[in-house]
Image (cartoon, grey):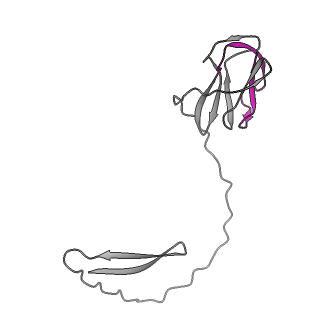
Amino acid sequence: MVRKFVVRVNGKEYIVEVEELGTPAQPMQQPQILEQPKPVVQQQVQSAKPTQPESKPVKQESAPVSTTSEIGGGAKIVSPMSGVILKILVSEGQKVEYGQKLVILEAMKMENDIVSDKPGTVKKIYVKEGDNVDTGQVLVELE
């Protein structure tokens, strides 16, 4: 036998169909109320300031990421996502090769390697360790 029930969850009503299996259930006895319930007095509670535990990012292997914007003969390596600069692995004037790691960017507790997608020389570094960066922000310029 299939029975239908209307269930309300968070103010939204759902129709639920339940099929009985096996032997029918015995009706439960209703408990008797010995005392009338006392009204609840609402007390004003001071809210505590939330604290966040200090956490370190989990080192997870990620695929190298590189986004380049070509301007003139040089290339600007831009951030593919918002995050925090954890480490800068190159310095101005340093020669870099294709696929070389330039910057480590932390986003959503994951470390992402930002790599060079062409060989060249680091002309300028636009960020420093600890900087918050946005998507598309220039990190390193190559020539």
Residue drawn 24% across the image and 83% down it = 26
Q: On the picture, is 62 further left or further right than 96?
A: left
Asked whether 106 or 47 is in front, the reply is 106
Q: Considering the image in quadrants, where does the N terminus appear?
A: bottom left
The picture places residue 78, in percent across and down from the top left corner, at 71, 29
From the viewer's side, name the closer residue of 105 and 35.
105
Residue 141 among magenta residues = yes
Q: Is residue 71 left or right of residue 40?
A: right
Q: Is residue 116 magenta?
A: yes
Residue 121: x percent and y percent?
73, 12
Please tell me in which quadrant of the rendered image residue 71 appears.
top right
Instruction: Tell me the quarter of the picture where residue 143 sits.
Output: top right
Residue at horizontal 33 percent and vertical 75 percent from the top? 18
As drawn, 97 above or below 38 = above
Percent coordinates x, y for residue 84 in the rendering: 68, 34
Q: Quadrant of residue 92?
A: top right
Looking at this view, name the residue that lies furthest to the left. Answer: 23
Horizontally, residue 36 falls left or right of residue 136, namely left
**48 with respect to 39 (left or right):** right
The boundaries of the magenta stretch are 115-142
12 or 109: nearer the viewer:
12
**Residue drawn 69% across the image and 64% down it:** 46
